């Protein structure tokens, strides 16, 4: 396919995409296929001679779509949103065409890991400075990192990768599942008394299970005093801080060593797009410095990082989105999702059979049927089997809880009401069948 | 921007992309800007109200293009190729629209790290099985990993991330910069005698500096006997193995524990696209297992991995490319690049002032002016300052060497000849000015 044909096929693809997104509601949101369904639909090997483009396009509906979870359907309420917008798609088309290599790009899980490694390197350096004879491996084996028991599983995995102890700090329902300063302080004291070296704390603003916010105004000063690196993971909630009314949720940021959020979650920029801020750049660069000749460039000595070959082109989509929506458009978008979540919360609260399981701060509503875990598990299974709407669960204080996250760009009040109608209808069925 | 406008803008973007790629030769391949050039061209803050789309498009030439290194220009010969093709772009448009989250995607550097972590976990498990009382941190501090002194810098970085010793195995020009079995065997014996635990070897097929191939038929049996995990990094060369005549370069693969190559380098699939194969899946899964409720799914018990929500949608572009080119088209593409490299090699060999610095096996030619490093450094600087073609250097046996990698999809013999004309012309100037 050369440029002339691409002009034609590209325009057809643009229409196909517009058709797909305009009619996405009519598709079952969640696929009804078994793992491996693809195997019988595609040949064992790549074709010897080219297929026709028409055949490839035909197979989008035959092969691909049956396995798709439609994350952009207004009936999708699982996990957290993944962004999608027309300007971002246009930019991605261009980024793909320019096709530069971005060397410094990652998502929130990588940011957590990168911050942990920088913290480990800083801790080892500080200890060696005061005790140069101490063997480095002996230091690593004494290091201890902390995060909330509500933190994303990638935080625990970062600890495994880095080969350091990662301790979970217990949280309570009465504290709204936020890490308390007093708890962290006590754990640090106990660990120091046991000969360990606390060096890293990953705070979460907007946890995955319930969108809880750790008290960083309390936690930050403790970390600073103890020379513990405080990383803030605001993967989901970070986007909301562009609205003044949500900005106070970020108070305490001044104590952080690093901060990350994912515009690809809630800021209308397609996956992947994750932004990381670091207080002291040299802490990061020092931990990863590599210097092969084939990566040298003229501006190295200046200590300035040459971004043009890097994230610039993959961030095109951010730029398109910021410009096409404007701050106001983006704020409206965030506020609308929060309003839709509040609307759903009101519907739940108005029904005596249900309860709200955590404060609704942004676009996530945690709720459940009053009653056993079993009845809630059955309800969720029934909801997802219906394939009209899609939700995932979480566990809060031992309870099985349903998470209703407003995700799609096109979700409207009527979708929320329809979802609630469906949930209550299935709940009725389940309650008739099961003791609760 | 809603679907109707996207239909119009998308089609304009398709034309813009086609125009860009059809006329890419007319642009300076390498940007003539200083780091930070963007700062004065863009506002300090995102706009309060939306910009017009026309303004955004105007800024592509004003703001973006001046900073672009045109990786797809037929005058680009630096690093290694990064893939780009029209079918892949079409697929990426669709992938972007479907916008599912791929949880298991990475590039070769990540594959190296992932393999290293799996190997570390396997090694610790095996040692604990025979000596359950041994403290785990004591084991990690004794582990030792190996790679060639020609391996990519990301291998060394993987060792830093995992917190394990990584030793570089010396290579020689007389061995074509390949790791020899005897050298690895000796290092293992010495390390074991010193109480260390060898556990991981990263072999490279097609090194970055000179496209050297480690002798995995010799190295594999040594690793297997010593229970050392052998990972093979074939990031660039891997694509060539679809041609029977290059397939023997892969002999010894039967001894590997894991293998990786990047279709986004040389197989016409846009960045990023990296494929990893692991002998024993449980070694990998065991090292990273995380089990939060919000990621549970119905098929977990079957031990089968549900790919539909994962790499499938990001691999759409691979699928489009395989189908639109066919195996034959892809083989032709690889062969054409190798031929172009051979053509360049002949031009170099026919000129007494130059020498070839390493065997030309695939699409990379390492060459230099006979003479000092200084004269070659000056020549390269002159070449890149001209901005007509772009090359990067490497170091081989202490010599400063120029790397000429055939990269762009549209490179033809005439581009090669033109590049050579330019290089010899600049060489003449440099040799008149400098002693050599």
Image (cartoon, coloured by chain):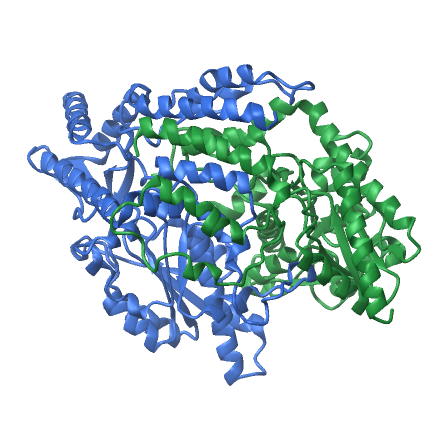
Chain colours: A green, B blue
Image position of B136 (left or right of B429): right
From the image, which quarter does the N terminus of chain B lie in? top right
Does residue A426 appear to the left or right of A32 in the view shown?
A: right
Where is residue B383? Give x, y as percent: 25, 25
Rendered position, A368 above or below B55 = below
Quarter of the view holding residue B39: top right
Q: State the image quarter where residue A369 is shown.
A: bottom right
Residue at position x 51%, y 49% in the image? A65
Q: Nearer the viewer, residue A232 or B355?
A: A232
In the figure, B95 relative to B71: above or below?
A: below
Q: How many marks?
A: 0
Asked whether the viewer can see residue A297, the reply is: yes
- The reply, left or right, for residue A65 in relation to residue B232 is right
Q: Residue at x 56, y 64 (%)?
A: B288
The answer to whether residue A171 shows anywhere in this view is no
Query: Which is more toward the observer, B275 or B36?
Result: B275
The image position of residue B422, as x and y in percent, is: 18, 23
Quadrant in the rendering for residue A321: top right
In the foreground, B162 or A427: A427
Identify whether B122 is placed above or below B43.
Answer: below
Quarter placement of the C terminus of chain B = top left
Q: Position of residue A194 (x, y in %)?
A: 74, 68
Give the percent coordinates (x, y) of residue B154.
42, 50
């Amino acid at each position: 396919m050369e440029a002339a044909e691409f002009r034609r096929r590209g325009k057809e693809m643009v229409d196909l995409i517009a058709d797909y997104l305009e009619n996405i509601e009519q598709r079952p949101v969640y696929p009804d296929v078994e793992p491996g369904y693809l195997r019988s639909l595609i040949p064992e090997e790549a074709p010897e001679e080219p297929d026709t483009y028409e055949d490839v396009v035909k197979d989008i509906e035959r092969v691909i779509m049956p396995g798709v979870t439609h994350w952009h359907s207004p009936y999708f309420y699982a996990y957290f949103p993944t962004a999608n917008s027309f300007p971002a798609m246009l930019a991605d088309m261009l980024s793909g065409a320019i096709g530069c290599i971005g060397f410094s790009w990652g998502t929130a899980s990588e940011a957590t890991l990168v911050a942990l490694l920088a913290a480990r390197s800083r801790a080892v350096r500080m200890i060696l400075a005061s005790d140069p004879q101490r063997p480095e491996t002996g230091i690593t084996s004494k290091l201890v990192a902390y995060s909330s028991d509500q933190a994303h599983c990638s935080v625990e995995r970062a600890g495994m990768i880095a080969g350091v102890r990662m301790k979970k700090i217990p949280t309570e329902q009465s504290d709204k599942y936020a890490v308390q300063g007093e708890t962290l302080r006590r754990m640090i004291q106990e660990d120091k008394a046991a000969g360990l070296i606390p060096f890293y704390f990953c705070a979460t603003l907007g946890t995955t299970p319930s969108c809880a916010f750790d008290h960083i105004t309390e936690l930050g000063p403790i970390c600073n005093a103890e020379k513990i690196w405080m990383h803030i993971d605001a993967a989901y909630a970070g986007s909301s801080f562009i609205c003044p009314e949500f900005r106070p949720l970020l108070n305490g940021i001044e104590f952080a060593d690093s901060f990350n959020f994912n515009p690809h979650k809630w800021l209308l920029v397609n996956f992947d797009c994750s932004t990381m801020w670091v207080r002291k750049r040299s802490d990061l660069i020092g931990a990863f410095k590599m210097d092969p000749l084939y990566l040298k460039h003229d501006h190295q000595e200046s200590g300035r990082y040459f971004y043009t070959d890097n994230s610039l082109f993959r961030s095109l989509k951010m730029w398109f989105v910021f410009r096409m929506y404007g701050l106001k458009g983006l704020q409206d978008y965030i506020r609308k999702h929060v309003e839709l979540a509040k609307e759903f919360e009101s519907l739940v609260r108005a029904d005596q059979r249900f309860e709200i399981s955590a404060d609704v701060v942004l676009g996530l509503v945690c709720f459940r049927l009053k009653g056993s875990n079993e009845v809630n598990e059955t309800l969720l299974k029934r909801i997802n089997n219906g394939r009209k709407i899609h939700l995932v669960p979480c566990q809060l204080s031992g309870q099985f809880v349903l998470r209703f996250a407003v995700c799609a760009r096109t979700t409207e009040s009527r979708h929320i009401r329809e979802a609630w109608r469906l949930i209550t209808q299935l709940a009725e069925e389940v309650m008739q069948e099961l003791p609760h």
